Image (cartoon, rainbow, N blue to C red):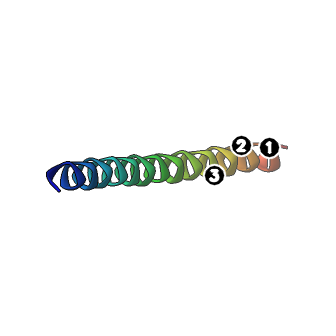
């Protein structure tokens, strides 16, 4: 029975770790997308306002 508990605890740790990595990756992706949108806005503004 104790080996079953160990397996459950190890699986829980693995699942929580992967979930944390996934959330962290999503946050980094959102930050990157936000920075890309700002860069595109600056680029479009420079290209359209030049005579």
Q: CA distance from mark 2 to mark 1?
A: 6 Å
Identify which residue, 31 or 6, lies in the foreground: 6
Q: Which residue is mark 3?
A: 37
Q: Secondary structure at mark 1?
A: helix
Relative image position of residue 21 (x, y in whole percent): 39, 46
Nearest the viewer among 14 and 5 is 5
Q: Closer to the camera, 33 or 45?
A: 33
Asked if the residue under mark 1 is in contact with the one under mark 2, i.e. CB atoms within 8 Å, the reply is: yes
- Is label 2 or label 1 in front? 2
The residue located at (39%, 54%) in the rendering is: 19
Q: Residues within 10 Å of mark 2 (few under 14, many from 20)?
A: few
Residue found 14% across the figure and 52% down from its top: 2
Q: Find the residue positioned furthest to the left.
A: 2
Residue 24 left/right relative to 36:
left
Residue 10 at x, y = what percent? Answer: 26, 47
Q: Position of residue 30 (x, y in %)?
A: 52, 54
Dot 1 alpha-carbon crowd within 10 angstroms: few under 14, some 14 to 19, many 20 or more: few
Residue at 62% in and 45% down: 36
Is disc 3 surrounded by few (<14), some (14 to 19) or many (20+) residues within 10 Å?
A: few
User: Which residue was labeled with disc 1?
Assistant: 47
Mark 2, residue position: 43
Q: For numbered disc 3, what is the local secondary structure?
A: helix
């Amino acid at each position: 029975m104790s080996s079953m508990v160990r397996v459950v605890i190890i699986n829980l740790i693995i699942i929580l770790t992967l979930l944390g990595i996934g959330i962290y990756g999503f946050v980094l992706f959102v930050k990157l997308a936000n920075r890309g949108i700002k860069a595109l806005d600056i680029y479009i503004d420079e290209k359209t306002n030049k005579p």
